[in-house]
Amino acid sequence: MLTDELEAATQHQGRARVALSAALASGPSHAYLFRGPRGAGKRAAARAFAAEILATGAEDPDDARRRALLDPSPHPDFVWLAPRGAQHLVEEVRERVIRASAYRPFEGGKRVFVVESAEAMRDESQNALLKTLEEPPAYVHLILLSSEPEILLETVVSRCQPVDFAPLPTGVVEAELADAGSPDQVAAAARLSAGDPARARYLLSDSGQTLRNARWRQLLEIAGAAGEDAEAATRAALEEEAKAGLKRSARDVADESKRAGRRRRTEILDLGLELRAAWLRDLAAVGVGAEEVVFNRDRLEELRSQAAGVDPGCARRAAEAVQETRRGLDLNVSEELALEALFFRVERLLG
């Protein structure tokens, strides 16, 4: 029987709930890969699942579970590793997971290691982790979380039990954000979020509205500003940690801050392009009389006005061009040139 915390974390994830329930009943495996889109609940499920593992065999199961569920957790046998910037640092993976897993539990009989955004591990880190995944001590359980499992090395994936998470239903996201805007705004944000409540909430914010309203040529500027803000916030947080006694060189602070800035810049630019593709898709839908599938439900009048002079087939091809450009940006092409070429291509298609 699942605890209330694990039941709540997998409320809308039937396959994951069945898999984790069976794992707890038969005895957890040594390694899991929680895979699915951002916002699907992988983090909450991993924390609740880890809490159940740590409670097993503990002198005081309720207390062990309580401490494991705290974020950050004070439980000495629970390690949660998240990337500080665009990638996990190789040395952090080695020190906090690989080497630490060799130590016996400080209390109880289990140790749990969670690696958030596992796809952000470099190949060097993933290869180093292989031996731990293949032959972990009997008391060690590893949980990798990934929104992009296809980026992980196949040798890593094959050594983990998969637990699949699906995007949250649109209605669930709408219900969670019911008080964050008008019904039409919330409906639009929920549909544009791809099942991610955090993204939907961002789209309802002033910054999110600015991104939704941005013209093509403004995307790089907005993404750059977001990256600068993230870099400054990360630097401030790391400097506070240094003041608290956590040793970190000035170079480490600068490098981690820059990585965080680049990651945020990339995220916002990609989201901006995704929003542009959704708008073009909506133009095509309105053009063929399928308004019920429109994402931007709070801007139907504007869509109707634009769709009046646009061929639906051209709008669909323009949306495909945007998606091609998004994929191309992963290949380290010049963003400015790629967006300039995309702008003229879309302009020609839409007339």
Image (cartoon, rainbow, N blue to C red):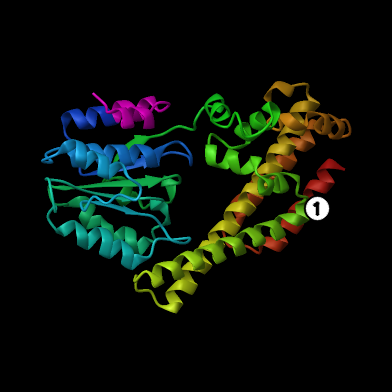
**Point 74% across, 38% down: residue:** 280
Q: Could you tell me which quadrant the C terminus lies in? A: top right
* Quarter of the image where one finds residue 51: top left
135 displayed left or right of 158: left
* Quarter of the image where one finds residue 64: top left
> Residue 85, position in %: x, y?
47, 62
245 displayed left or right of 294: left
Q: Nearer the viewer, residue 123 or 138?
A: 138
Q: Is residue 265 above or below residue 37?
A: below
Is residue 242 visible in the rendered structure shown here? yes
142 displayed left or right of 292: left
Q: Nearer the viewer, residue 163 or 239?
A: 239
Amino acid, disc 1: Phe
Is residue 28 visible in the rendered structure shown here? no
196 displayed left or right of 139: right
Q: Nearer the viewer, residue 205 or 102?
A: 205
Q: Is residue 93 magenta?
A: no
Q: Which residue is identified by label 1?
A: 344
**Point 21% across, 55% down: residue:** 132
> Residue 307, position in %: x, y?
83, 32
Q: What secondary structure characterizes most of the magenta part?
A: helix
Q: Could you tell me which quadrant the N terminus lies in? A: top left
> Residue 257, position in %: x, y?
50, 67
Q: Residue furthest bottom?
A: 250
**Point 87% across, 32% down: residue:** 305
**Point 66% across, 33% down: residue:** 181
Magenta stretch, residue numbers: 1-19
Q: Residues within 10 Å of mark 1 (few under 14, many from 20)?
A: few
Q: How many marks?
A: 1
> Residue 163, position in %: x, y?
34, 35
Considering the numbered disc 1 on the image, is that residue within a helix, a strand or a loop?
helix
